[in-house]
Image (spheres, helix red, strand yellow):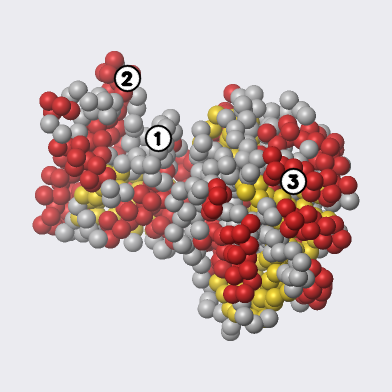
Amino acid sequence: MSEFSCWGRYPHAQQTAYKLSWRDQVYTVISSENSVLPYGQGRSYGDVCLNDGGALLVSGSIDRIIEFDRHQGIIRAEAGLTLEELLRVVVPAGWFLPVTPGTRFVSLGGAVANDVHGKNHHRHGTFGSHIKRFALLRSDKNVYECSPEKEIDLFRATIAGLGLTGFILWVELQLIPIEDSCIRMESIKFNSLSEFFEISDSSNQDYQYTVAWIDCLKQGAGFGRGIFMRGNHASAAEGKGLKVYEKTLPAVPFDMPEWMLNRYTVGAFNALYFRKQLRDSVTKIVPYDTFFYPLDAVARWNRIYGRSGFMQFQSVCSRDVIERILQITAASGQASFLAVIKEFGDIKSPGMLSFPRPGITLCMDFPNRGASTLKLLRELEELVCSRGGALYPAKDAVMSERSFKDCYPSWQEFMEYKDPKFSSSFWRRVTGER
Amino acid sequence: MKVAVFGACSAIAIEVARLYAADGHELYLVARNEERLETVAADLRARGASKVEIFSIDFLNTDAHHGLVEDIISKAESLDLALVAYGLLGDQLQAQRSFKKARKIIDTNFTSVVSLLTLLSNLMEKNASGTIAVISSVAGDRGRKSNYIYGSAKGGLNIFLQGLRNRLSTSGVHVLTVKPGFVDTPMTADFKKGLLWSKPEVVAAGIVKAVRKKKDIVYLPWFWRYIMLIIRHIPEKLFKRMSI
């Protein structure tokens, strides 16, 4: 059943998939199976969305909007609805997602279960911070309505709960008002990590969105170079109205051969990307999809890594550890061109197992080359976890049990709220549970 | 536009209704399960439909069709588009062993649709306007051992629609036969999916386009026209031995 895999296409899993269309079908499947896991769009990189040997509750067609209050900007919808579909409805009415990850092809339920974050973490915190309430169906057949006021512990456990506390039937989300659906974006080149920190420090106050692309192959002169992007929603006068933007380019038609991505081709790409922008700083008005979802334009971009897939490494840690990670990565020559760096803010998420915490988050893709890739990831993991940092479960395929338990000390509290029938490949890997 | 959808909880119908809702049209939804209908109706309202009404009925109960159409007309006054989207694939093996099972497939896909279309076509003929769109199937193009009971009901339906189109061509009523190929919906949940499979959204967009362009017969996606062209032209002597 290759149809249900994770975005990194590593690891693989065999599972019975139930494609559900209606809320009234969910309980029947839960009661008939021993181990179940909700599966949205399969955009998690590793095995948090897999349940090897068990069943998947595929939520993609449980995707109806239940209520949209156009005056208050509150939307209540079934958990299988994608952020793309949600934007189609709310953008023309003058609203936007309070927090958005780097792809709009994720489900609402997945956004809650992974407590996703975006370029505005320093201002708005995580996705879970904007949830007004949700309904959770558990294997005891009860539906729990959870909010910051009601079923508070279940609310906190389900946000970033990796789909393990039950099946989210619907979610109510507070949106943010926009005058226009474009972003006024400024791109600034930086030549070192310390320059990145300087720009980041001076941007967090005045810019709602900040993020940077960083070249993690470059050693010596130019180590830590990259392009910093910061932006705000455009005003009505600057923009082009409340349009829905969904630019698409041709999809990647097949698995590319593995040898195509190596330190020379990627290094050349990075050098070109860095030099493409001639001036040190450029300001433009761009559609929201260009700013937030550049990779969504290329359907199935994960195929560029070939059949063996890829692994993403996303960590959060202090500034000095980030420098060390970049040195190790650059020396290994294994990293790919999609590396992103951003400073998180200190807004605490309600989620017990939430990933974001104050520090710098660095996100790198590695083509799966087997043992050498695993060795590098282990080394980076050791470094991050021994220095008080954390890895992001939604992106992970290799973290050890010890690292998980060190990075997420609340896991024991979480165990009280985990549904006994719900499990995932990830969960069994990092807890040793059967 | 005033659009009535029969079988409004089917995967393709939901996607068609969403496209019309996004353009602010009025929707009159008919299906069996009232709770699910309510869910779909709320979704379409949120997506911009100017009006959504729901009607709950079991289509096999043809005696109730007259009352249903009257109910719809009392709320809508007239209809610009009637989309018949319900169907029953059934289980071929069970149906070839039991006439009771075969009959349910034929009644759902053919007899009940004829009943409904009799009422709708007379209404539209009187108003001298409107479109009748019916989701049939490529399975109706040639009988095959794997689904000939479903296929014969759809084949009968295709001929009925041809005749109806012929009859109504002078009165300004448009009749569209939609022949989808393999679509990934709950109806086909147990099939192994491959290259030829499409998503309901893709088929839905094709239906809306075919309605707008006043097509007579449309294969969706387009390549099924050619697949079926080949399948229809295989000599019977050969075809009867084939396993497709």
Q: Position of residue A148 (x, y in %)?
A: 78, 51
Question: In 3D space, how far apart are the residues under numbered discs 1 and 2 (Cα atoms)?
Answer: 16 Å
Q: Chain of mark 3?
A: A
* Furthest residue in direction bottom, as rendered: A237
Residue at image mark 2: B93
- Give the class, few, some or many, for how many residues have Cα within 10 Å of label 1's Cα (few <14, many ≥20): some
| Quadrant placement of the C terminus of chain A | top right
- Are marks 2 and 3 in one subunit? no
Residue at 79% from the left image edge and 68% from the top image edge = A193
Q: Position of residue A38 (x, y in %)?
A: 62, 38
Residue at image mark 3: A377
- Can you tell which of label 2 and label 3 is closer to the viewer? 3
Residue at 35% from the left image edge and 49% from the top image edge = B203
Please state if A185 lies on the left or on the right of A20 as rendered. right
For residue A57, say whether it is visible. Answer: yes
Residue at image mark 1: B187
Question: In 3D space, how far apart are the residues under numbered discs 2 and 3 (Cα atoms)?
Answer: 53 Å
Mark 1: amino acid: Met
Please state if B170 lies on the left or on the right of A154 as rendered. left
Question: In 3D space, how far apart are the residues under numbered discs 3 and 1 (Cα atoms)?
Answer: 44 Å
Mark 2: amino acid: Leu
Which of these two is toward me, A292 or A397?
A: A397
Q: Position of residue B125 (x, y in %)?
A: 17, 54
Mark 3: amino acid: Leu
As drawn, A251 above or below B232:
below
- Give the class, few, some or many, for how many residues have Cα within 10 Å of label 2's Cα (few <14, many ≥20): some
